[in-house]
Image (tube, rainbow, N blue to C red):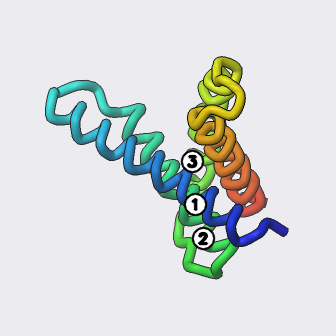
Amino acid sequence: MMSSADQEASLNSLKSTYRKLSNAYESMEGKGANTTLVKKRRDAIKVAIDTLRSDWYGTDFLYERDVIATSQLTLEDILPSIHKQLAKAIDRSPQLTLNVRRLTALNLAIESLKNRLG
């Protein structure tokens, strides 16, 4: 069982990622750029936040099976870029801490979504 502090750190990491993707989406949309990937990732992060909240706090999780499966795959597609960033990060840097937390949160969410798909 995770400590409540670790749960909060994971949720905060995902919320931060969601905000960044939302801002990127709005900025790209305003410029007429292709927003497909950013929107897909933003939506998957929202599902990730909701699945962890549901697991840890008993909140509702009202997503269709296909949305869960798509979100799981989208989150898995993000992992290689985080691993690359971790390989470049300097020991004890804020960037390292941020990416370790993000990786932990994504892995927890992926596991939760897999469990929901049975």
**What secondary structure is found at the residue carrying circle 2?**
helix
Q: Position of residue 32 (x, y in %)?
A: 17, 27
Mark 1 or mark 3: whose residue is earlier in sequence: 1
Q: Which residue is mark 1?
A: 11
Write the residue at 38% across / 43% down.
20
Write the residue at 24% across / 31% down.
28
Gap between marks 1 and 3 measured at Cα? 16 Å
Is the residue under label 2 in contact with that under label 3 (CB below 8 Å)? no
Q: Is the N terminus in the top left, top right, bottom left or bottom right quadrant? A: bottom right
- Please indicate whether residue 91 sits to the left or right of residue 68 in the image: right
Task: Specify the farthest residue to the right.
Answer: 1
Mark 2 or mark 1: whose residue is earlier in sequence: 1
Q: Which residue is mark 2?
A: 53
Q: What amino acid is found at the position of numbered circle 2 in the picture? A: Arg
Q: Position of residue 104 (x, y in %)?
A: 71, 47
Mark 3 or mark 2: whose residue is earlier in sequence: 2
Q: What amino acid is found at the position of numbered circle 1 in the picture? A: Leu
Write the residue at 28% across / 26% down.
34
Question: Is residue 67 among what the camera can see?
Answer: no
**What secondary structure is found at the residue carrying circle 3?**
helix
Q: Which residue is mark 3?
A: 71
Tag nearer the camera, 1 or 3: 1
- Please indicate whether residue 65 sits to the left or right of residue 35 in the image: right
Q: Position of residue 17 (x, y in %)?
A: 47, 46
Q: Position of residue 47 (x, y in %)?
A: 53, 57
